[in-house]
Image (spheres, helix red, strand yellow):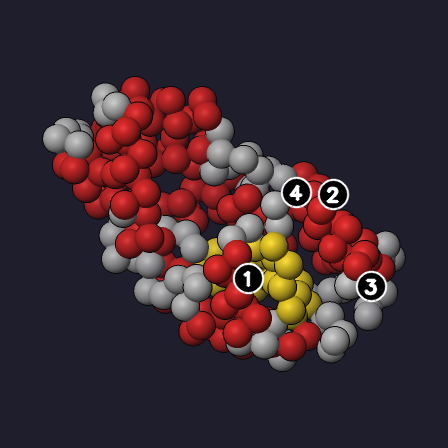
Amino acid sequence: MSPIQAVLFDYGLVLSGPPDPAAWAQMRSITGLSEELMHRGYWAHRHAYDRGELSGRAFWETVGSDGGVLLTPAQVDSLLAADIDFWGRVNHPMLEWAQSLQRAGIPTGILSNMGDAMEAGLLARYAWIQDFGHHTWSHRLHIAKPEAAIYHHAAQGMKTPAANILFVDDRLENIQAAHGVGMQAIQYLDHQAFLAEMEARDISHLFHLTALHKI
């Protein structure tokens, strides 16, 4: 394999931990929707939100409309905030690894399917997001994983050949798409399994870097 020169991270369920069930319950309470209607509406329109076809406000208005609810502007504001909480729990082992890469001078980036309000909310909450040298947010490009173009955009932004980028994502279809553009990629489902896969690929040295040491 080509040497790893940069690491590209998904945000959701890689840099972030599992969604917060309390935030989901709060969103249900705000909308008044049943679990079934909330689940159906939230996921039916999420990809359009991530691709920038819907703004955050339009997303929630559409979720409400699908469930037969006319949401007020104040309710939408509360839903946008609760949605940040829903996806806002940090996966500390992966964040700590990313920060060790940064201290060692290894380029890091984020490639995430993310809507406009979600990006703005997370950037306001977490200063560490700015420490990643490159960000590819899907809503800004009107494309989203697993579309090949978004991976090419990320590789260009990181100024690194695709073959020398390790991409980490929780979804298999996104991993397969990364392979399709020539990246190395590992599916992240469990931290210990991820460490074992790094070991199996003989790249576990990336977990034992010293500051300003480049591979």
State the separation of the CA atoms marked 1 and 4.
15 Å
Query: Disc 1 or 3, which lies upstream in sequence?
Result: 1
Residue 97 appears in the picture as rendered = no
The label on residue 175 is 1
Rounded to the nearest whole Å, what is the CA distance between mark 1 and mark 3? 19 Å
Which amino acid does the dot numbered 4 rest on? Answer: Asp
* Marks 2 and 4 in Cβ contact (< 8 Å): yes
- Percent x, y of residue 161: 63, 79
**Secondary element at tag 2:** helix
Between disc 1 and disc 4, whose residue precedes? 1
Name the residue: 68% across, 75% down. Answer: 164
Instruction: Give the Cα distance between marks 2 and 3.
Output: 15 Å
Determine crowd level at label 2: few under 14, some 14-19, many 20+ residues with C-alpha closer than 10 A: few
Element at badge 1?
helix
- Quote the CA–CA distance across marks 3 and 4: 18 Å
Check the picture and name the quadrant holding the C terminus. bottom right
Residue carrying label 4: 190
Q: Name the kind of residue labelled 3 in the image.
A: Asp
Residue with the mark numbered 3: 202
Mark 1 belongs to which amino acid? Ile
- Residue ID at (50%, 60%): 174
Residue 129, position in %: x, y? 57, 50
For label 2, the residue is: 192
Q: Identity of the amino acid at label 2?
A: Gln
Is residue 62 found left or right of 133 in the rendered image? left
The residue located at (61%, 55%) in the rendering is 187
